[in-house]
Amino acid sequence: MTVATFIQLIVEGLGTGAVYAALALAIVLVNQATGIVNFAQGGMAVLSAYIALVLVNLFAPATGTAAALVLAIILAAAISFVLGALVERLIIRRFEGGDPDTAVVATIGLLTLITGICGIVWSYNYLPFPWFFSTGDAFRVGGVTISWWALTSILVIVIVMVLLQLLFRGTKLGLALRAVADNPQSAALSGLRVGGLLMIGWGFAAVLGSIAGAIVAPKLQLAPNMLEEALVYALAAVIIGGLDSPIGAVVAAFGVSVLENLAAVYLATIPGTSIPFIGHDLKIVVPFVLLFLVLVIRPQGLFGRKSVVRV
Amino acid sequence: MPLLELTDVTASYGPVQVLDGVSLDVPEGGAVGILGANGAGKTTTLRAISGTVRAGGRIVFDGRSIRGMRPEQVAALGIAHVPEGRGTLGNLTVRENLMVGAFLRRDRRQIAEDIDFLLDLFPNLRSRIRSNASALSGGEQQMLAVSRAFMAKPRLLILDEPSLGLAPSTAKDVYAAIARLRRESGIAMLVVEQNANLAFSVVDSVTVLETGRSVLSGSTAELKGNDDIRRAYLGA
């Protein structure tokens, strides 16, 4: 166990964490705007990845793989935006203002539907997803091996976060989205078109999902249930970080992923003994233990605000 | 022609008829109060105007029927509604709340001037300009709610019980500021209030609602002289 291994585990953890973070951000965005946890977020992201794959295969003969990838990812994100907005308008709108539990069941139904459609159209087999480089490629810095995939994932999510922050804090559209999320009735009384803004919010969330899909597809290969596990982690991150805190969700997503990686190696046996403990097989318990602790100690999430209702 | 004209307006929540013939006029630049007991339909009347409940009858603003319009359309025509219970945007700062109020405006320079004007009117808000609205006191939130509505540069400001839940002295301060706002901007107002004495400090005429109907209206001077009104709403 060297320092190099330690750093490597952290970087790899951050790389995987980037995928969880993108999904978690999407979930927080939707929850802030509509008060609904969208279980179909992962399914929508997978659909976007399939669309991207179709587009890559379409463009690649003419443009070469790299250019085709860029074009396909951008186009798939745009299509996701439209699909996300349509899901809000055509399905979720019917449940807004009602019992959130009903809406959640509808999103679970949507997840099943999308996964099923992907399975029928593209089969349940793993399809390779091209990438700019092999996901195994790595470079060494001072004895630490770092994979390009992890590095680019982290970079992408950092850029996305900065852009989101600029959108929400620096633009009129961002202000309107936050106003609608905060209090749709008051926002409407100030002349904001609430319905349209909710569609835009769901559209942006779908774009975040589509980014998560594009990052993870080359690593795991594309399959209808590719993001199921990631969705579980993302939900854990959202609850740990706080359902209303984008920063909290991202920090928790990275934190969960890094801690899980560290536990797999350093807690493979109970320290000081040779009795098997967490290890690679059981590392999935880590987010759940964290989740349990957070729910017991600070149910609003580490970064969440306790909602106080004034009468 | 009055700025706002309600004729025989009706509204119901499900099977329960709440408004059963409300009629009132707000003249250009005038201020009208709506008085009435709990459940008389005061808040629902305002909601019918701003499009947040479905209504029947005639609702005409500036010569054009607005009945059946969506809230954001009504707002765009120049009616700003401060709902009951304030309705500030709690997770947004004071400045952001004001900017949301000015959402439909394009005149940046004038927006900045209006913010300045309001902060002079409500000095408490100036020192808390970067605080989240949820961190303000009840009185400050009410002032912010009024200011946000004013930022829309409306032709008619609708206020639903600005004194609700405020200490008497705070409620007085809020009304003093509303009166000043009216004097300095000349904006028309429609004010719902339980506390008639407070309402009379701002409005020039009053309509009294009983079980969803307008039963009486007149200038404040007339109504102050009316014994029934004095007994029912002025506690004297």
Image: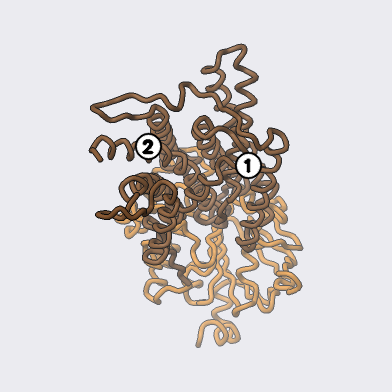
**Residue A97 in the image, given as x and y percentages of width and height:** 62, 60
Identify the mark nearer the N-term, 2 or 1: 2
How busy is the neighbourhood of tag 2: few (under 14 within 10 Å), some, or many (20 plus)?
A: many
Residue at x 46% of width, y 39% of height? A19
Residue at x 35% of width, y 57% of height? B125
Kindly report which numbered mark, 2 or 1, lies closer to the viewer in this rendering.
2
Image side of residue B114 versus residue B62, left or right:
left
Question: In what quadrant of the picture does the N terminus of chain A appear?
Answer: top left
**Residue on which the image places disc 2:** A12
**Height in image: A218 above or below B113?**
above
Image side of residue A28 versus residue B207, left or right:
left
Disc 1 marks a residue whose amino acid type is Ala
Q: Find residue A27 and name its label.
A: none
Disc 2 marks a residue whose amino acid type is Glu
**Height in image: B99 above or below B160?**
above
Q: Which chain is orange?
A: B
Q: CA distance from mark 2 to mark 1?
A: 33 Å
- Can residue B101 be seen by looking at this rendering? no
**Residue B24 in the image, given as x and y percentages of width and height:** 67, 66
> Chain A appears in which tint?
brown
Q: Find residue A85 and name its label.
A: 1
For residue A128, which quarter of the picture?
A: top right
Q: Secondary structure at mark 1?
A: helix
How busy is the neighbourhood of tag 1: few (under 14 within 10 Å), some, or many (20 plus)?
A: many
Q: Secondary structure at mark 2?
A: helix
Residue at x 50% of width, y 43% of height? A23
- Can residue A39 be seen by looking at this rendering? yes
* Front one among B135 and A164: A164
